[in-house]
Amino acid sequence: MLCVKRKQTFRWKIDVRIEADSRPDSSNHSRRMIKTRKTNSRTSPREHLLESNFKLSGFARRLLPQWRPLDLPLSKATVVVAVSGGADSVALLLALDQLVRVGKLSTRLVIAHFNHQLRGKASDADARWVRSLGKQLGCPVVVGRAQVAKRAAKTGDNLEQAARLARYEFLEKTAKSVKASILITAHTMDDQAETVLLNLLRGSGTEGLGGMKAVRPMRLGSKLLLARPLLSWARRADTEKFCRERGIEYRLDEMNTDESFTRVRVRRQLLPLMQTFNPNFVETLTRTSDILREDNQSLETGAARLLDLSSNANGRPSTSLQIDLLILASPSLRRRALRLWLAGIRGDLRRLDRSHILAIEKLVKSSKSGRLIELPGGVAIVRAGGRLHYRKQAAAE
């Protein structure tokens, strides 16, 4: 039996701990805390916060209908909620907490916060703020940290990519440690629009232009689900408004306004420009991405079937493929099948682009045996005996 080769995970030490204490936040310029009105001496701030939650808010009412279509559990499940301290994740957490308290959901909420250590004292203050919020809600808080800048320097990833990889490694590890079946993030329609535009600028097919999925396995074959219940309906303005209505002064991250990052320039320059042509551009682009994602799923299903027939592996990853069926397939399905094949063996498609897939496709259509295509990572694709073979190359001495 051949096993899927995964990329190495948790390569960097990530400190993880469940926090029960709360320390005051000393950074006044970016401080965003929970406001509470004056109460009698027998009413704690936590009790006051809970009092205001017994009436289900409009935001929580809009969140609940997203649960069933995403096939998320209504009861008997542990859910990890990624909380940065920003408006989006705080609004999602508070709405979920409301749904649990009124009995619409019967799930255990665990808060996960990752400190990227990119903003010095401000990053530490964010972590303390999230701990405090968790304590007031009565939810366990898991805090992780890693030196993302050092990781980026060593791996060659840009800072955004390195931060994302470290964050999701931590979130997955946290979910496993608390035996959670669902990991929830607070991506909104604005995030979806930014992602689609970024993929368009970089050059992408229907998979990239389809944007983020509202729910998917954390990784190939994983039982842990990554869900984004705000993705199809909530705008950033909605989350900020909800936080204000609940008396929450959320955290502000100055990196979200740093236009040296491409995503920030898309957010602050490109999206506003597009909205001068269509005020509802974000909603329109989200609908377009939905259509493309559905079309992409149909093509992926066909490509998976082609891959299965070409590998004769009964759904298991195989290091070789029959060429005859690949030759008969349409170019679109053939290229998708090759991408799925490589992803299944490697664990991902990092450092591979369209030129590599086209080179392998040319090998498929070639009549000569013994030819090979070199891929990043010391790997070669070889045509021999009417099959394509995935082979590791010996390291040069």
Image (spheres, grey):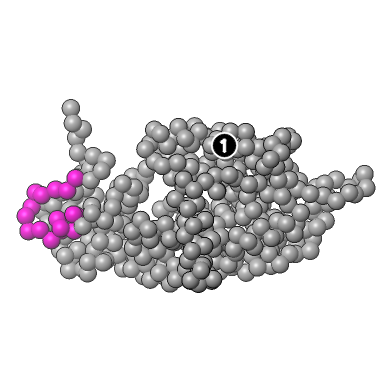
Q: Is residue 58 above or below residue 92?
A: below
Q: Is residue 380 above or below residue 335?
A: above
Quick one: 181 or 139, which is closer to the camera? 139
Q: Which residue does the image show at 18% across and 31% down from the upper left?
A: 396
Q: Position of residue 65 (x, y in %)?
A: 62, 69
Instruction: Tell me what residue is drawn at x 82 percent, y 46 percent.
Output: 45
Question: Does residue 308 appear in the picture of this structure?
Answer: no
Horizontal and vertical percent position of residue 96? 67, 58
The type of residue carrying mark 1 is Arg
Secondary structure under the numbered disc 1 in the rendered image: loop
Q: As rendered, which of 276 and 244 lies closer to the eye?
A: 276
Image quadrant occupied by the C terminus: top left
* In the image: residue 143, left or right of residue 318: right
Total marks in image: 1
Residue at figure coordinates x 53%, y 37% from the top left: 118
Residue 163 visible somewhere in the drawing: yes
- Residue 279: x and y in percent read 54, 71
What is the span of residues highlighted in magenta in the rendered image?
359-374
Q: Is residue 372 magenta?
A: yes
Q: Which residue is mark 1?
A: 119
In the displayed structure image, the side of residue 47 where residue 288 appears, left or right: left
Residue furthest top as drawn = 397
Q: Quadrant of residue 154?
A: top left
**In this picture, residue 20 sits left or right of residue 279:** right
Q: Is residue 168 one of those drawn in magenta?
A: no
